[in-house]
Image (spheres, rainbow, N blue to C red):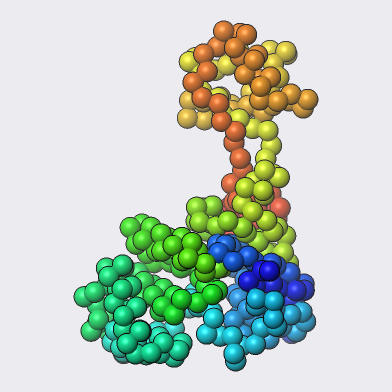
Amino acid sequence: MPVLELRNLKKYFATQKAVDDISLSIEKGYIYGLLGPNGAGKTTLIRMITGIFYPDEGEILLDGKKFDPSNDAAQLGYMPEERGLYKKMKIGEQALYLAQLKGLSKSEAMSRIKEWFVKLEMQSWWNKKVEDLSKGMSQKLQFVITVLHEPKLIILDEPFSGLDPVNSNLIKEEIFKLAQKGSTVIFSTHRMEQVEEICDHIALVNKGKKILDGSVNQIKQEFKENLYSIGLEQASSPVNGEAPYELLGTRNHNSIVRIKEGNNPNDVLRYLIQKGVTINSFNEILPSLNDIFIQLVEGTPAARQFQHV
């Protein structure tokens, strides 16, 4: 049974279809990427999942039962893109207060806060006020507050915004650990390269509609174009009309080829060996998620946003 199931969700604002008949099924322990450009409908979808908005049509199931925000909110951890911290409050007091709102006792909350502060190297921050923190430091605090009560479903909206590479890797490792322990993570972003590093499954949305849904590997296999990178001893490979591939050019001193229809990688290797060519490397080139998205929405405003990421 999926942890979270969305069935034909729709949400309208005046005449705009912010979410237009989206269905998703998310399994326990998965890191699920919810992707799309600004204005695609991601935030509206998340706000329905968290009970901030009610869908105009469709239903949300949590563990097979209809989602009830008043009773099920404690099972969720939501880190919004627009941060919601009390600027004048001390960090330690704020974490303690919000943990107790999620149902933890004071002693249990204190124990978990100290553990997380050590993990993320925040021990010396206890008496600092939020207004004195950098964006990256605020981001780490928001992450801790989101996961402190060990929620079943964790929703992270642009969690790496403002973080330097070291702290990004630190948070990334903690996300992997949470999933390994059984939490399900929805990771929302428009940064495709982050998704390829983190997510098991993804859904791409554009203009309120779902346009892709599946595992990262499955989607890349579906959109691959028989491209290969071949490292050779000489600058370029011998090419003539008999070759089972088309030479497209070079990249990083490797030959980039497209295998012709009716041939396979073994045919290419056999051909090169027969020509006496020494092969140093032979790798399939799979499209990036960024390339796939642009291919699907090429020429639209959504595509133009992604082309500059």
Q: Compare residues 74 and 242 and report the one nearer the observer.
A: 74
Does residue 14 lie above or below 38 as drawn? below
Query: Which quadrant does the N terminus fall into?
Result: bottom right
Where residue 126 sits: x, y (%)? 25, 81
Residue 92: quadrant of the picture: bottom left
Q: Is residue 235 left or right of residue 212?
A: left
Is residue 218 something one can see in this rendering?
yes
Q: Compare residues 30 and 224 and report the one nearer the observer.
A: 30
At 34% from the left and 78% from the top, the residue drawn is 112
Where residue 119 sits: x, y (%)? 31, 67
Q: Compare residues 251 and 180 and report the one nearer the observer.
A: 180
Give the number of callouts.
0
At 69% from the left and 16% from the top, the residue drawn is 243
Q: Compare residues 283 and 240 and report the one nearer the observer.
A: 283
Where residue 6 sits: x, y (%)? 71, 73
Q: Is residue 148 left or right of residue 204?
A: left
At 24% from the left and 77% from the top, the residue drawn is 125
